[in-house]
Image: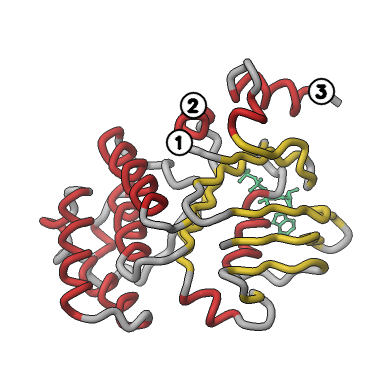
Amino acid sequence: MLKIRNYRKLYGKKVAVDGIDLEVLPKEIFGFIGHNGAGKTTTIKGIAGILEFDEGEIYINGNSIKDDPIKCKMDMAYIPDNSEFYEVLTGIKYINFIADIYEVKQDKRDFLIKKYADLFELTPNLGDSISSYSRGMKQKLAVIAALVHEPKLLVLDEPFVGLDPKATHSLKMIMREICDNGGSIFFSTHVLEVAEKLCDHVAIIKEGKIVAAGTMEEVMGDRSLEEVFLGMVDHD
Ligand code: ATP
């Protein structure tokens, strides 16, 4: 569903990501972890098609993000670490705007908006303007808008930041449900306990290079993910 081959990105002369390879199969939740500045967001923005890169290829559902960005984007939803909205819109207008772009049929969008807005307890606020939303409410809105077109691949940058414990639980349930239904998820996080419990696969990036990748069992062995991670990022 997502294939990254030799992805390399420089900012000026600085190498931010140095030729990484990753693959996420259908039904997989893939966690991407690394210290601040390791290259996670730079990779995720490349996948989302909003950052040009210097070398390599990224394929989404078999299509190249460079050659077929629209096809790729129709199959994918991306939630950045700090979503920006047209704040004068109400929540429901924003979701409908996204659903219009993806040409989601009315009955399907009504069903999905109700399902996810109820789950995140945002239904009473959907008629309010986004400028009145708290950070967590904006994050919930970003998730609902992403799910309204049933993406095959969901790409999330630090999705749990700002969510309360109940919303965090709901998002974890949704992530698992998407994968059980054949979808794929690629997300970055600093919350290693969540990654350990939720992910099927994990990759650790350090200074732009992948230093460990595999199934959660392969990467962890008989240690916790935190122990593995700290061992890798502290060790030079
Ligand atoms: P964090 O966990 O702090 O969000 P990250 O793993 O997402 O970090 P990136 O944002 O991908 O890290 O940054 C990777 C490297 O690229 C860092 O050294 C950062 O300083 C650099 N970088 C990121 N964006 C830019 C930019 N627009 N211009 C120049 N350098 C950048």
What amino acid is found at the position of numbered circle 3 in the picture?
A: His
Q: Residues within 10 Å of mark 3 (few under 14, many from 20)?
A: few
Q: Is label 3 in a helix, a strand or a loop?
A: loop
Of circles 3 and 1, the one toward us is: 1
User: Is the residue at mark 1 in contact range of ligand 1, meaning its CB lies under 8 Å from it?
Assistant: no
Q: Is residue 50 left or right of residue 205?
A: left
Q: Is residue 6 left or right of residue 67?
A: right
Q: Is residue 59 left or right of residue 139?
A: right
Q: Which mark is residue 193?
A: 2
Q: Which mark is residue 235?
A: 3
- What colour scheme governs how the chains and residues are painted in the rendered image of this protein? secondary structure
What amino acid is found at the position of numbered circle 2 in the picture?
A: Glu
| Front-most of residues 68 and 168 | 68
Q: Is residue 80 left or right of residue 216?
A: left
Q: Residues within 10 Å of mark 2 (few under 14, many from 20)?
A: few
| Front-most of residues 106 and 80 | 106
Q: Quadrant of the C terminus?
A: top right
The residue to which callout 1 is attached is: 198
Of circles 1 and 2, the one toward us is: 1
Marks 3 & 2, CB-CB < 8 Å contact? no
The number of callouts visible is 3
**How far across and how far down the image is residue 129, in percent?**
22, 66
Mark 1 or mark 2: which comes first in sequence?
Answer: 2
